[in-house]
Image: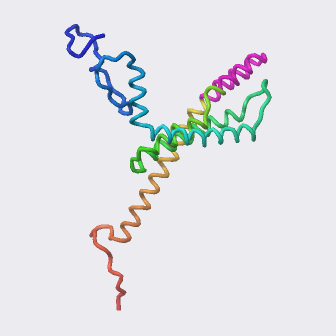
Amino acid sequence: MHTADDDSGAETPADLPVDPDVPEVPDVPEAHPARTRATGMLRDRWDVLLVIAAGGALGSLGRWAVSEAVPHATDAVAWGTWLENVTGAFLLGLLMVLVLDYWPPHRYLRPFLAVGVLGGYTTFSTYMLDTRALLAAGREAAAGGYLAGTLLSGVAAVWVGIVVARAVVVGLERRRRSRRDEQTGPRTGRRRSRRRAP
């Protein structure tokens, strides 16, 4: 393994970008570096993992409820799974704009809602199993349509979620400015006098 002091010109671990969500691990030779990293992550982020688990439990209950409400036969298109993934994609687009552009930063918000709730609510594995079931039933056209249709409608739903969220944020900002202008006056920055003219 190359180190930062190598003169070989090869890219070294010290030169590579680091994910800000991953804690730094000291460069100490260990017998089991993966175990050391995992132990460090559990020790440093146990609270975030609990938040993700709680959100995942809630999201999974939501997915179960949709699957119960929209059942399907094994050789039929799984509209319940499609609905879960497309609505989850829409909510993810909406949520990311609100989390990144509007709400103040919070340690647990994105892990709970995006990773936990929406990660538990949406399902890639069931989407693939449903596609496989259609293929096994000899419904190749339906499988291809389901595979491509879910992907394309999911991407479109994320885009719609982003557009809707940005429109909501712009509306909220206008309302906030309007209220501030009513209290302070649009140009002077001072409170308006509430005295009536005689």
Q: Nearer the viewer, residue 146 or 128?
A: 128
Q: Is residue 32 magenta?
A: no
Where's residue 105, x and y in %? 39, 47
Q: In this view, does 56 lie to the left or right of 11?
A: right
Q: Is residue 17 visible?
A: yes
Quadrant position of the N terminus in the picture: top left
Q: Residue lying at the far top in this picture: please name it.
A: 8
Q: Give the magenta-colored segment's residue range.
A: 127-151
Q: Quadrant of residue 29?
A: top left
Q: Give the overall secondary structure of the magenta segment.
A: helix
Q: Quadrant of residue 57?
A: top right
Q: Residue at x 68, y 33 (%)?
A: 81
Q: In this view, does 72 lie to the left or right of 145?
A: right
Q: Residue lying at the far bottom in this picture: please name it.
A: 198
Q: Does the magenta stretch include residue 147?
A: yes
Q: Which of 193 and 85 is in front in this view?
A: 85
Q: Which of 85 and 114 is in front in this view?
A: 114
Q: Residue at x 51, y 39 (%)?
A: 52
Where's residue 182, x and y in %? 38, 70
Q: Is residue 127 above or below residue 70?
A: above
Where's residue 177, x and y in %? 38, 62
